[in-house]
Amino acid sequence: MLQIACPHCGPRDENEFSCGGEAHIARPKQPDAISDAEWADYLFMRTNPKGALAERWCHTVGCRRWFNVERDTVTHTILRVYAMGAPRGGGGGA
Amino acid sequence: MAETIPSQSALAPLGLEARPWPEDAPVRMEEHAHSGKLVLRGDHRDSDFMNAVRGVLGMTPPLVPLGSMMVKGRVVLWLGPDEWLIACPAGAETALYAELRTALNGVHAALVDLTDAQTIIRISGPRARDLIAKGCTLDLHPHTFGAGHVARGTLAHAQITLLQTAGDGEAGSPAFDLYVGRSFAQHLWRWLEDAAREYPGGTDPA
């Protein structure tokens, strides 16, 4: 069980949250102008690093707000919690 | 032809009035049915929104996370950075809704009447905190969770909003208002009743 520090509610157990997958994946601005391969890359391909990964999380049963979490996929250590829309900043990973 | 159907509280089918809790029970529970509940959403950085809300409520809604405020018999609970629950006496919600709706005319905001969607289970007594902690992952230690504190979380798998209405020092024992969706209310009541059996004096759900 992870304990995640919600930016609003403070530390809560993982089962109060929903994970929204990898963060910082920008939707192509003109989907009809790109190839199927590029669209598939946006839809399906993820970095899947062994190490630091930026993810989107939502505090579903609490304040219901989305935010970003940087988590180590090996140790499950939460490296950083930061606001939606904020750049990833430091940290390793892919 | 429209018929008028009297509203029935979520726990009415359990016939709770027939089995009151002993006065000296370490935990007592009661349903506080039909009290008005409105959910208000808007951006606190929008001065039009805040002025409209202040004009009606006579207060600024709590901006500090997990806080609540009581003014004029109403309680405003922080649910999120742009979301509040306004609890008011039973029957007062229609007028309050209309008043807020008028004040928020043209302002980017959302207002929903949840009066009949949720009910309140009031839990009090010296072991109230222990009872809730049995099925809840929230940190309920008095140093962290005190009078006026609000948190949404889960209790026995049901989504709840928990408000502590009386501190541990006042009148000797804490009291909590537990807001729960009406379709979960019977499950939650039965679970709480069962969990309270270890505290002598509690009613036997059998």
Image (spheres, rainbow, N blue to C red):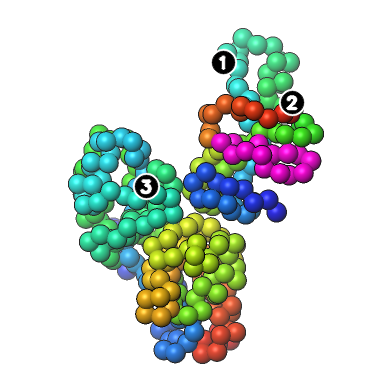
Which residue is painted at 38% across and 68% down in the image?
B165
Which type of secondary structure does the marked residue at label 1 adopt?
A: loop
Check if residue A73 falls in the magenta segment.
Answer: yes
Q: Main secondary structure of the magenta part?
A: strand
Q: Residue at label 1?
A: A29
Dividing the image into 4 quarters, which one contains the C terminus of chain B? Answer: bottom right
State whether discs 1 and 3 lie on one chain.
no
Image mark for residue B63? 3
The magenta-colored residue range is A68-82
Asked if A12 appears above or below B165 in the picture, the reply is above
Quarter holding residue B103: top left
Dividing the image into 4 quarters, which one contains the N terminus of chain B? Answer: bottom left
User: Is B102 in front, or is B144?
Assistant: B144
Which residue is painted at 79% across and 41% down in the image?
A74
Amino acid on which disc 1 is placed = Lys
Q: How crowded is mark 1: few (under 14 residues within 10 Å), some or many (20 or more)?
A: few
